[in-house]
Amino acid sequence: MFNFKSFKSTTSLLLLMGMTTGSLMPIVAPILAPAPAVAQSAGFSDVASSYWAKDFIEALASRDIIKGFPDGTFRPQDPVTRAQFAAMLRQAFNKNKSRDAVRFTDVSSSYWAYTAIQEAYQTEFLSGYPGNIFRPEQRIPREQVLVSLANGLGYSATNAVASDLQFYNDASAISSYARNSIAAATEKKIVVNYSNVKQLNPGRNATRAEVAAFIYQALVSAGDAAAISSPYIVALVDDTPQNTAVTIPAGTAIPVRYEKQKILVTPDEKAPLTLTVAANIQTNQGTVVIPSGSEVVGELQPATGGSQFVARELRLPNGQRLPISASSQVITKTEQISKGTSVRTVIKDTVLGAAAAAAVSAVTGDRAIATEEVLGGAGIGTLIGLFLGKDKVNLIVVEPNTALSLKLNQDLTVQP
């Protein structure tokens, strides 16, 4: 019944995004010479199949609203300037001009985005700052993007603004000028929040992936694009069918990954650990039950031949926390620590279980392992005696970017 797409690591990337029609002037500062942009209907090489914004990005690319370099990269995490955003608006929307042009003192007629900026102003998507200043190279915050889209499309909140905004955990951080427009954008399902759907981060600079998601949702709200299913779209009204709980049967495999520092533990110790779901878990009908990026909280436990991750809680992006009984394959990779080994070498980019930290200290004779280098901040002093007199110790290793597969030990019921 269930299937999932395999997780692929992203690669380093470059992007040309939001070019004006008929222009080959790139808007990524490191590119020194114009390069032809290519419309992308297929995937970008640096947008993994499990990437949260993949569908939004590829949908806009297929419409020539955003463009990639000929090498097929996208650079989803890069910030977006006000000029770049104006160029994207020009490509995305065909709206009649409702006010006269204005001369911005910091945008010359020869500036690459001059026409796009003028059109964004005349269609009321964007305005300037006092003194007829536009600040084209300023990175645009998320709340400005949402205000722009709501204003340009003529949206106003129909509910009480405070009622709409109470959905967000950080509603108090929304600027006063932006509150009505963000409430309107929220009502129209333009807001997309990854990875915590209740966290707006209004003042943070918008990334290219986030802007793509916002623009696509604005097109959906205007009836110009088909809806995309995503657990990160903010919906104030639950319009999903009732009784849609899905039971994932015992034995189902859930791909997870560990992305942070290397971990060292002794074969017989327990250590807290949180893993990330590597790909959407979905029904055969395409309903996403467990979104990529969900967190699985548990601990490493001793197992025959090594250590095993045992899951205790599943944390979904929509705020649900579900008990889960699942375990990984046994991790058998080891690293030997011998007398004379430098502790600094051992703990570089590494965290240790409390017993592993005690073992390293005892074998090397170096007691300089800090609490912050120990999983859970556990003390190690009382454990050192267990390893005194040993010349070497073998520790279990969990490497960064380790891919694991959790197998459900019991049925898991999820409300998508």
Image (tube, rainbow, N blue to C red):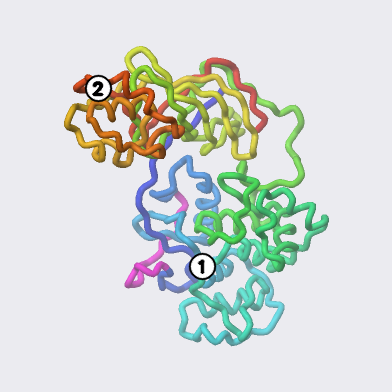
**Residue appearing at x 42%, y 30% in the figure:** 379
**Measured Cα–Cα span from mark 1 to mark 2:** 51 Å
In depth, the one of 29 and 64 nearer the eye is 29
Circle 2: is it few (<14), some (14-19), or many (20+) Cα within 10 Å? some
Neighbourhood count class around disc 1 (C-alpha, 10 Å): few under 14, some 14–19, many 20 upward: some
Q: Are marks 1 and 2 in contact (CB under 8 Å)?
A: no
Left of 93 or right of it: where is 42?
left
Q: Position of residue 71 (x, y in %)?
A: 34, 56
Q: Is residue 127 magenta?
A: no
Q: Is residue 37 magenta?
A: yes
Above or below, 300 relative to 23: above
Residue at 35%, 52% in the rendered image: 12
Q: Which residue is mark 2?
A: 393
Secondary structure under tag 2 reads strand
User: What amino acid is labelled 1 in the image?
Assistant: Arg
Image mark for residue 139: 1
**Could you tell me residue 398's position as x and y percent?**
35, 30
- Residue under the point 51% across and 24% down: 311
Q: Is residue 124 above or below residue 7?
A: below
Q: For residue 266, which quarter of the picture?
A: top left
- The boundaries of the magenta stretch are 28-42
Tell me which secondary structure the magenta stretch mostly adopts.
loop
SS for dot 1: loop
Write down the quadrant of residue 69 in the picture: bottom left
Of the 4 image quadrants, the one containing the C terminus is top right
* Residue nearest the observer in this picture, 141 or 39: 141
- Residue 344 vertical placement versus 269 (above, below): below
| Precedes in sequence: disc 1 or disc 2 | 1
Find the residue positioned furthest to the left. 340
Residue 246 image point, x, y percent? 65, 25
